[in-house]
Image (cartoon, helix red, strand yellow):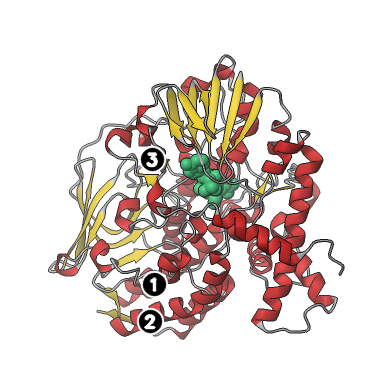
Amino acid sequence: MSIDFEPDALREKYQSERDKRVRADANEQYVEMKGQFAHYLDDPYRAVQERPALHDEVEVAIIGGGFGGLLVGARLREAGIEDLRLIEKGGDFGGTWYWNRYPGAACDVESYVYLPLLEEVGYVPRKKYAPAPEILEHSRNIARHFRLYDNACLSTEVTDLTWDDTERRWVISTNRGDRMRARFVVMANGPLHRPKLPGIPGVETFAGHSFHTSRWDYDYTGGDSTGGLDGLRDKVVGIIGTGATAVQCVPHLGAAAKELYVFQRTPSSIDVRDDRPTDPAWEAQLQPGWQKRRMDNFNNLVSGIPESEDLVHDGWTDIIGNLLIRLRQGEGGDMSPEGIGRVMELADFDKMEQIRARVDQIVQDPVMAEALKPWYRQFCKRPCFHDDYLPTFNRPNVTLVDTDGRGVERITEHSVWANGVEYPVDCLIYATGFEVGTDYARRAGYEVHGRDGVTLTEKWADGVSTFHGFHSRGFPNCFIVSIVQSGFSVNFPHMLDEQAKHLGYLLGRAAVDGLTLIEAEQEAEDAWVQTIVEMAQFNVKFLEACTPGYYNNEGRPAERSVRNGSYGGGSPGFIRLLEQWRAEGSLAGLETD
Ligand code: NDP
């Protein structure tokens, strides 16, 4: 396979673009939404319904009503567990899809593999990429189908979780005055759950209208998640951030605002989206088991595991297809991990050259086009897929304010300053993402007090410590659903479902065997942490060369990502490991009573 780029030159360019973005304050550059910023977290979608405080008891409490909590609830129902309660801070189920209703919001992994439990619920999405309202409705359908509204507490934020060792119960306190008890607790808080603000000097002084994309203010902008933001016709709007969220909402802002400034620190990679309605003929021929086959096929391909066919065939699987073609053509006869890594790098260069060429094809202004080109490996940041984002920069009312990696300089009462230039704005939208890598309790919004009052924050002060990502010794009967020391897939709900099935098995076993205590053995937990650390090395090397972002702890992967990262053997490997563990059947590594 011929190459028409210089690998060494690209490596050097990637390195220099990375270096100019690495900051001493790394993850500390962001501001927590508390105190004077707490109002950015208010729920704009649903008024809180009054209800009496609860002082009751359930067998299983699930914290979080997003896909994680819904999947656990569904799999527990399948395991025959009736006495359960979901607790959700939003006014309804849906999690990320409850909060993220910004214009243009839609999944960017194919909906037939992204939306979980399609066959169970009896639904096929209407488009290749389902829009946010359809995904939110599917979440509600899952809740209805598995009777998860029964006994649920919505608009309820957990404020504290404390283990009562004598009674062997968790005591759950909430912002609604509840003090409930549960034998088992599942924490499915979500990985991108707590929005963050950039710590730009003066961020607190802005006096115009402002909000975070995860709390879109349609009262101000008009329109809905399909666009039509008529309230912005006479407004100058600034948006900070050009990640996956901004890529989806900027086309709508560009279409509506009198003037739009897009403040960019690092461009995203924007590949073809090619959305289309679901083909009725394809839908009609689907056979039972189709969704699992498709999810496995996608997950294997994006994890670099060959499949005889590519069922999804999109921008995610493309890069792997390219790699396999190269390998088949005999490039890299060296099949060691390093050898495959070298060919993978070439496939990546190829892909990113296509992405950069696409910018030139679409964006008319050559200076703007240059600034919109991403110079890093594709999986250093979340790859984006959109057909309207780049053309938006051809609109006369849209200005890209590229800061060459430096970010916005400062914010004043009515303006945003970048590159020494003042940009007065009426409305400022923060598309600045969510906390990753901060303490678990800070992101969750509550502390967990385990045996002898030890908190999870104290136990994890030097890094996370779990068995299989689910259990942490000293916190019995508490199960964590997260990507830390667990599996990670770009198709996030797929991994959540595998975790949910695992918990369905565990709690189903607890019910059948009459177990009242499940806790990680110390040796098993230590061994798992060791496995995570050993297997992280290859990934850390990759991430170290990446431009900063939440994937690599803002350029410092070695500090937290090693121990606090995901299982290094890939998500198919993690799924297999859990399946084998369940098949073995002895609950190895767990102390039970
Ligand atoms: P991100 O964290 O990806 O993006 C934040 C953006 O803010 C980045 O462009 C960042 O720049 C920028 N930024 C931060 N500080 C400053 C500053 N001081 N000055 C200028 N710019 C700044 O958040 P998103 O909400 O876009 O996406 C979060 C994740 O949500 C995605 O990665 C994806 O996993 C998920 N998502 C999924 C979707 C789906 O369809 N499944 C859709 C949308 C989001 P820099 O890159 O330089 O740090």
Q: CA distance from mark 3 to mark 2?
A: 35 Å
Q: CA distance from mark 1 to mark 3?
A: 28 Å
Relative side of 516 to 37, left or right = left
In front of the other: label 1 or label 3? Answer: 3
Mark 1 / mark 3, whichever is N-terminal: 3
Mark 2 / mark 1, whichever is N-terminal: 1
Q: In terms of depth relative to the viewer, which is nearer, 504 or 445?
A: 445
Secondary structure at badge 3 equals loop
Q: Is residue 189 above or below residue 433?
A: below
Question: Which residue in the structure is indicated by mark 2?
Answer: 587
Image coordinates for residue 272, horizontal then vertical, percent = 74, 47
Whether residue 306 is visible, yes or no, is no
Question: Which residue in the structure is indicated by mark 1?
Answer: 506
Amino acid type of the residue tagged 2 in the rendering: Leu
* Ligand 1 is within 8 Å of the C-beta of the residue at disc 2: no
In front of the other: label 3 or label 2? Answer: 3
Specify the quadrant of the image occupied by residue 130.
top right
Q: Are marks 2 and 1 in contact (CB under 8 Å)?
A: yes
Q: Residue at x 46, y 59 (%)?
A: 553
